[in-house]
Amino acid sequence: MTRAWILPMLVLLCGSVVATGLVFQGRPYAAAILLLVFVLLAASNSRLIFPRSVGALEAQRRSAADGRPIVFWRPGCTYCLRLRIRLGRSAHTLHWVDIWRDPARAAAVRAVNDGNETVPTVFLAGQPHVNPDPEWVREQLSRSA
């Protein structure tokens, strides 16, 4: 199991334990609803909701060819989730790089963020933009299209 799946698995485990307790208390409907909430929370913090990550070198090559931004993200980041959800379908056109899977990129993100792994960090034409407004990212996508 990779590091990126630890948080979603812990969320599912905690939800299962709490739901089991509710079942033993005689509240099966509350247990089912709570378990559904935990499943949705786990899915939103997993790689299932994000487009497939590519390596940093591949993302740079693709970005140079098509001019689209590169987004450095990590699972469990609420700001990354906010960016992904607010971009909607256009998020699939960005080049996503998971910094937990690419240690060199994690170091690059730390270099532009004073030693912190602050994500999402969006690189556009070689310039970093830390936690940009999703509307700004959408504008940049429309310009590159």
Image: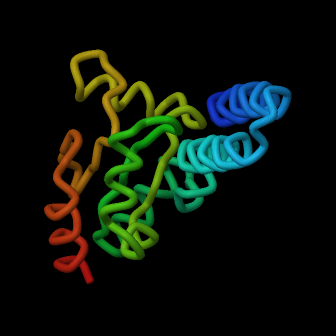
Between 49 and 125, the one lying in front of the other is 49
Q: Please identify the residue farthest to the top as the structure is shown.
A: 115
Q: Is residue 105 above or below residue 96?
A: above
Q: Is residue 48 above or below residue 108?
A: below
> Is residue 36 rendered to the left or right of residue 92?
right
* Residue name at image x 65 percent, y 36 percent: 8
Q: Please identify the residue farthest to the bottom as the structure is shown.
A: 145
Q: Is residue 49 visible?
A: yes
Q: Classify the position of the C terminus by image quarter.
A: bottom left
Q: Is residue 51 above or below residue 6?
A: below
Percent of width and height locating residue 6? 68, 28
In which image quadrant can residue 131 be found?
A: top left
Percent of width and height locating residue 140? 18, 69
Q: Count the numbered circles shown.
A: 0
Percent of width and height locating residue 65? 37, 72
Q: Is residue 1 visible?
A: no
Q: Please identify the residue farthest to the front as the structure is shown.
A: 26
* Residue name at image x 72 percent, y 35 percent: 12
> Is residue 120 rendered to the left or right of residue 73?
left
Between 53 and 87, the one lying in front of the other is 87
Q: How is the image coloured?
A: rainbow
* Residue name at image x 75 percent, y 38 percent: 27
Q: Classify the position of the N terminus by image quarter.
A: top right
In which image quadrant can residue 139 be found?
A: bottom left
Q: Is residue 31 above or below residue 3?
A: below
> Is residue 30 rendered to the left or right of residue 107?
right
* Residue name at image x 75 percent, y 33 percent: 19
Between 104 and 36, the one lying in front of the other is 36
Percent of width and height locating residue 88? 38, 70
